[in-house]
Image (cartoon, grey):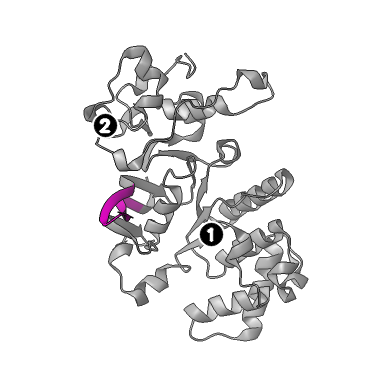
Amino acid sequence: MDKIIEANHMTVCFNLKKGKELRPLKAIEDVSIAIERGEILGIIGESGSGKSTLAFAILNLIDTPGEIIDGEVCYIDGEKKQVDLLTLSLKDEMAYRWQEVATVFQAAQSALNPIITVEEHFIETYAAHVKEWQKDQLLAHITELIEYVRLDKSVLKMYPFELSGGMKQRVLIALSLLLDPKVIILDEPTTALDVITQWYILEILRKINREKGITIIFLTHDISIVSSMVDRIAVMYAGQIVEIGPVGEVAQYPGHPYTQALLEAIPNLEDSIETRQSIRGATFNMLEADGTCRFKSRCSLARKINCEGLSSQCNQLFSVSNNHFARCAHANEMRGVSHDE
């Protein structure tokens, strides 16, 4: 396995003030994940599951009152040299951000400066990272990138408010390619876009991965979108990765009850909408984390086999099969169990 990023035992804590007391909330806890060079990895989970926090932690962009209290993020360059991105100086950190690892943040509508043109966004970004450059060559490169994401070069002279949501998203994708990064992290890149535009964006991302060999990390809450384009999928729930494996295998043989519940909630063309089941119960309160299973109160398998969700049953990712793991000691008992039983 040719890794390009390896995050180990990442924990991000937010100190929440309640009266005069500070209560620590671990938005992600002891998360480890290896990202392979050239793959498309999908990270899914409902709002508040920790997807964006994990992405910001990988980029070392956690702001106060948040803090990375444990873990490391190893970036492995082409010479197999490992660099912990969390220990770099600000100057060295800037060399890795955008040039090695770029990102497309959530909400394209607010990610662009409304008072400068699209072209100026590219020029300012490039100038911040490269000391010596020629304007003519840079403008030719920018035009090439804009056309690569299927936009007309006239867009460069426009302001963000003149663009549709899908056009803004494609501008951000082109901007992420500006310095030829090895990895791009995309946080909910299809949110608030119509279905046609969503699939248009996905096709562009497939093209970037296929033709440029760029590793893509795709964060979303929509499993039906991500499953069509990723190689592997990681499922997050309540600040933990609860399952990870090849997308086809995870979809066919989910090893964690939460993954199965997600799959059974998705409408499809083969049955009636009435057969779909929402996930019963309330989302886990992160302030109540005590080391036991965070899904146990909502788990259909736990009710069937009287699982108590002890720490020993959920404190690691158990093997389901080769390259497929789930945070459930009963992962191999999942086959044939319906969430609504």
Tell me if I can see residue 189 in this picture.
yes
| Disc on the earlier residue, 1 or 2 | 1
State yes or no: discs 1 and 2 in contact (Cβ < 8 Å): no
Q: Position of residue 303 (x, y in %)?
A: 37, 16
Q: In what element is the residue under mark 1?
A: loop
Q: Residue furthest left?
A: 312
Q: Which of 194 and 226 is in front in this view?
A: 194
Q: In this view, does 196 lie to the left or right of 28?
A: right
Badge 2: residue crowd in 10 Å (few <14, some 14–19, many ≥20): some
Q: What residue type is labelled 2?
A: Thr
Q: In this view, does 262 lie above or below 212?
A: above
- Answer with left or right where residue 118 lies relative to residue 106: right
Chain part drawn in magenta: 6-27
Q: Which mark is residue 117?
A: none
Q: Which residue is drawn at 37% across and 25% down?
A: 297
Q: Which mark is residue 105?
A: 1
